[in-house]
């Protein structure tokens, strides 16, 4: 049953043992969160200890921590087993010289080993740098070079995409199987946990910008309370829950809400290896009895397009669904209500914010089309061009009063970039545009810049353009996100050809493959259009992506209109 947000807040307040619902803003105070983190009162933390070892110490060693399937075979691990494995891995890292603050990169497919090595790196006091498994050589190079990665754990396939010569900081690389063998010798060793200060680094994720290279968003140990509290009250993890987040830990959703938030709350975590497959996904929910499911609008839309397939499965275990990363269409919410008998709760946050900031609490009234309300204790606002707050329902820049527990510590060695997120009057600028209604519900409008979200994955147009012009036939390139029913946006590139080149059969496909194999499959343009020239600003000669996009949208609208005319003629 849907309740008003005040009634829903009351439910949360009760679960949190707060005096009154008005105190729900206390959820976000350190004191509240720290009560649950066992080592925190000592002032020393370790996220991996809090995720795994603490539960073993508290008597939950036999509880299932992890259920894995890749469609062909399943694996199960208890908390005690995960502790044992990650202890051994952390010993290998420490013995190899890993020190507090070192960058340990993890380049592995979505698998138990990927999750375990992230935790092990953190156990050893290092900063974990998980890389998305679809990254190709250039994407790997830029990230590892930027923060001078010293260690890498990968496998026999992905290692081929590591440009060793270009990352001179790299001291050691392990193949996961060799790494696993090395860990065997630490069978009976003591705990390897390295106790850390709240400002010590924990996790680095690269996010794309509309200009320049991807930036390294560094989170410190102090992000933990944010993960703990939103995991408990937004993901709604209870002790018997089986929780599945579909994102790869190379993306922030896959690390924060795939690894940390659920395990801080002692959930049984599900991993699905491999690509999207509607049948496999439904069958996984049935077989593992998934109760909480966190995914993205594109995935829900892909399932929606499979029609009645869901009827072949028993999906009644599901009780709480969540979505993130791109606008959640109201029709998807209605579809889910029919198919799963459960609502989809939208959540809004960013790599930089460290955790959810705008949410729909379980059972609270959902306004389809809205992303939800500010998490209690968080102040969101809509600002005008002078960074002054706007009244209800006016569209402007979506901003958050800084700081909050999960806010990034820094952009790796780029203070200028970090500072550019904040206004003089204390707001963090998200780069999104939105409006907030009189009940505090936030409605997403778009991006203030040219960043593209395709199938929930963030792509910087600049990265794609840079790659395109490395192709010998391409002179200039302008890249936009073209609206797409299934994927939210697809990447479309407009290119001009170099002198001496003319269009030939297969050229655009060749260019597409070039981006795909060098950068990443999800960053390769689905459409490439060869044009005579690209629109540019008069003064600086910058390519006007916005104009390209506007023209593309107008073209799409015309196509729809003419089709409608044909049908109704
Ligand atoms: C977008 C992902 C609409 C937004 C956790 C933001 C959303 C960017 C939503 C951050 C939502 C995130 N509805 N758009 N519920 N949630 N976004 O860093 O543009 O990969 O700025 O973090 O995703 O993307 P990132």
Image (tube, grey):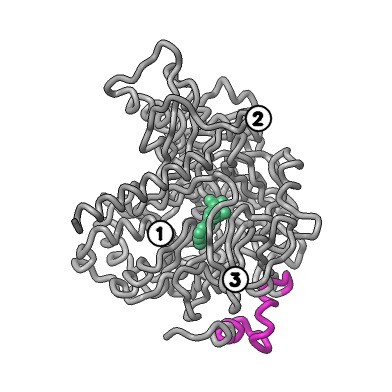
Where residue 98 sits: x, y (%)?
Answer: 65, 38
| Depth order, front residue of 188/11 | 11
Callout 3 touching callout 1 (CB < 8 Å) = no
1 or 2: tag closer to the N-terminus? 1
For mark 3, does the 10 Å Cα neighbourhood hold few (<14), some (14 to 19), or many (20 or more) residues? some
Would residue 390 be counted in the magenta stretch?
A: no
Q: Position of residue 45 (x, y in %)?
A: 70, 58
Count residues near mark 2 (Cα–Cα under 10 Å), then give few for <14, some for 14-19, many for 20+.
Answer: few
Left or right, 385 with reference to 310: right
Using the numbered discs, state the Cα–Cα distance from disc 2 to disc 3 in whole angstroms.
35 Å
Q: Please name whichever residue, 446 or 77, is drawn nearer the observer in this view of the structure.
A: 446
* Side of 542 where 293 appears, left or right: left
Q: Circle 2 sits on which residue?
A: 540
- The boundaries of the magenta stretch are 10-31
Residue 224 x/y as whole percent: 64, 61
Q: Is residue 57 visible?
A: no
- Mark sitting earlier along the chain (2/3): 3
Location of residue 512 (image quadrant)? top left
Residue for badge 1: 297
């Amino acid at each position: 049953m849907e309740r008003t947000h005040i009634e829903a807040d009351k439910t949360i307040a009760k679960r949190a043992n707060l005096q009154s619902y008005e105190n729900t803003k206390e959820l976000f105070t350190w004191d509240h969160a720290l009560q649950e983190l066992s080592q925190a009162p000592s002032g020393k933390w370790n996220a991996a200890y809090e995720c795994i070892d603490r539960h073993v110490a508290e008597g939950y060693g036999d509880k299932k921590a992890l259920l894995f399937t890749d469609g062909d075979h399943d694996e199960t691990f208890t908390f005690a087993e995960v502790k044992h494995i990650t202890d051994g891995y952390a010993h290998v890292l420490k013995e190899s010289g890993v020190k507090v603050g070192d960058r340990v990169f993890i380049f592995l497919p979505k698998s138990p080993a990927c999750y375990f090595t992230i935790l092990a790196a953190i156990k050893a006091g290092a900063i974990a740098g998980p890389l998305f498994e679809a990254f190709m050589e250039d994407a790997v190079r830029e990230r590892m070079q930027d923060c001078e990665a010293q260690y890498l754990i990968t496998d026999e396939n992905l290692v081929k995409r590591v440009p060793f010569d270009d990352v001179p900081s790299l001291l050691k690389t392990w193949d996961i199987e060799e790494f696993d063998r090395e860990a065997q010798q630490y069978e009976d060793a003591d705990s390897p946990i390295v106790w850390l200060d709240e400002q010590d680094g924990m996790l680095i994720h690269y996010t794309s910008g509309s200009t320049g290279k991807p930036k390294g968003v560094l989170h410190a140990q102090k992000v933990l309370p944010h993960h703990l509290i939103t995991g408990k009250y937004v993901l709604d993890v209870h002790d018997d829950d089986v929780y599945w987040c579909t994102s790869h830990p190379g993306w922030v959703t896959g690390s924060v809400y795939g690894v940390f938030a659920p395990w801080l709350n002692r959930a049984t975590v599900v991993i699905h290896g491999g690509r999207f497959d509607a049948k496999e996904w439904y069958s996984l929910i049935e077989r593992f009895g998934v109760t909480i499911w966190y995914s993205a609008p594109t995935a829900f839309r892909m399932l929606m397009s499979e029609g009645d397939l869901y009827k072949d499965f028993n999906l009644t275990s599901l009780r709480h669904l969540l979505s993130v990363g791109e606008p959640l269409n109201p029709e998807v919410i209605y579809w889910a209500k029919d198919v799963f008998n459960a609502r989809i709760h939208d959540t809004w946050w960013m790599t930089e914010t460290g955790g959810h900031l705008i949410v729909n609490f379980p059972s609270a009234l959902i306004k389809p089309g809205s992303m939800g309300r500010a998490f209690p204790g968080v102040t969101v606002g809509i600002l005008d061009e002078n960074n002054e707050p706007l009244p209800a329902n006016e569209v402007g820049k979506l901003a958050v009063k800084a700081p909050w527990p999960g806010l990034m510590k820094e952009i790796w060695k780029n203070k200028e970039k970090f500072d550019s997120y904040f206004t003089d009057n204390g707001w963090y600028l998200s780069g999104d545009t939105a409006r907030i209604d009189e009940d505090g519900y936030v409605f997403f409008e778009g991006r203030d810049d040219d960043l593209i979200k395709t199938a929930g994955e963030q792509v910087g147009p600049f990265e794609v353009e840079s790659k395109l012009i490395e192709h010998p036939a391409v002179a200039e390139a302008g890249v936009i996100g073209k609206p797409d029913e299934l994927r939210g946006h697809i990447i479309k590139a407009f290119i001009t050809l170099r002198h001496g080149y003319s269009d030939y059969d297969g050229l655009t496909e060749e260019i597409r493959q070039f981006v795909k194999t060098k950068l990443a499959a999800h960053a390769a343009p689905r459409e490439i259009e060869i044009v005579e020239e690209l629109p540019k600003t008069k003064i600086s000669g910058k390519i006007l992506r916005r104009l390209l996009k506007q023209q593309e949208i107008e073209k799409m609208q015309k196509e729809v209109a003419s089709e409608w005319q044909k049908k109704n003629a």
